[in-house]
Image (cartoon, grey):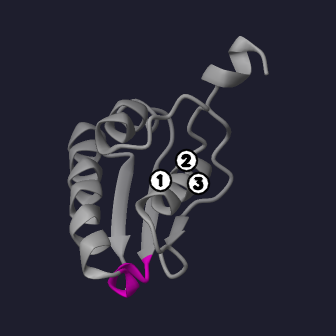
Amino acid sequence: MNYNDFHAFKEITENPIILDFSKCKYLGEIHLMLKEKFGLPQYYGENWDALWDCLRYLFDDEKYIVELHNLDSLNKKLQEECKLMLEVFDDVHNETSNFEYKIIS
């Protein structure tokens, strides 16, 4: 893998971006889904600060809606952890009107 591949964001291919938590049993699986859906670079650190660092400038050019599905299917510990993810989403939304999210179920 070359330097550019490691640092490159990949194209987001869907809008709305569907995050389905129904198969997530571990925090690492959630971060992997976020990495794939948002096209995050290889260096993404799989923590909420790293998510903020990656997302805060990602939505400057185009409007995206993120739909969160089956968030309530997560075990209680992961639901608590995902409250931090929602705080990051709130912060990103406050930075740019091009980012919105909806909790569907």
46 sits to left or right of 18: left
Tell me how far mark 1 sits from mark 3, CA to CA.
10 Å
Whether 2 is drawn above or below 12: the answer is above
- How would you rate the neighbour count of disc 3 (Cα within 10 Å): few for under 14, some for 14-19, many for 20 or more? some
2 sits to left or right of 42: right
Image quadrant in which you'd find residue 1: top right
Q: Position of residue 83 (x, y in %)?
A: 21, 63
Q: In terms of secondary structure, where does tag 1 sit?
A: helix
- How would you rate the neighbour count of disc 2 (Cα within 10 Å): few for under 14, some for 14-19, many for 20 or more? many
Residue placed under numbered mark 3 in the picture = 37
Image quadrant in which you'd find residue 4: top right
52 sits to left or right of 13: left
Question: Circles 2 and 1: CB distance less than 8 Å?
Answer: yes
Question: Circles 3 and 2: CB distance less than 8 Å?
Answer: yes
Residue placed under numbered mark 2 in the picture = 35
Q: Position of residue 52 (x, y in %)?
A: 32, 38
| Residue sitting at x 37%, y 78% | 71
